[in-house]
Image (tube, grey):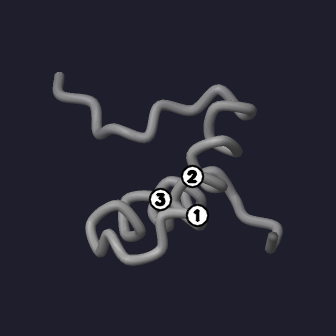
Amino acid sequence: MKIMSNEQLVAAYRDAEKNGQDRDWAKLLKDEIRKRGINPLKSRR
């Protein structure tokens, strides 16, 4: 996997979920997001 910043990682995950084509890639991104402790959802304040 490429080295990505947190913002790039979340954006790639959202894009993969939106397209819904490559489930393995989306799962890999989600696992990395969990490892880093990032919330992939937009916060509503």
| Distance Cα–Cα, label 3 vs label 2 | 9 Å
Residue at 37% in and 59% down: 14
18 versus 42 height, above or below: below
Percent position of residue 35, x then y: 74, 32
Query: In the picture, residue 20 is in which quadrant?
Result: bottom left
Q: Residue at x 70, y 45 (%)?
A: 32
Which of the two labelled residues, at mark 1 and mark 3, occupies the earlier sequence position? 3
Between disc 3 and disc 2, the foreground one is 2
**Residue identified by numbered label 2:** 27
| Residue type, mark 3 in image | Tyr
**Mark positioned earlier in the residue sequence (3 or 2):** 3
Asked if residue 36 is positioned above or below residue 9 in the image, the reply reads: above
The residue where tag 3 is placed is: 13
Q: Which element is circle 1 on?
A: helix
Q: Which residue is mark 1?
A: 24
Task: Give residue 27's position: percent from left, percent from top.
Answer: 57, 52
Q: 5 left or right of 25?
A: right
Which residue is nearer to you in this view: 25 or 4? 25
For residue 16, side relative to residue 35 (left or right): left
Q: Quadrant of residue 41?
A: top left
Element under disc 2: helix
Q: Secondary structure at mark 3?
A: helix
Pair 1/3: label in front: 1
**Mark 1 residue type:** Asp
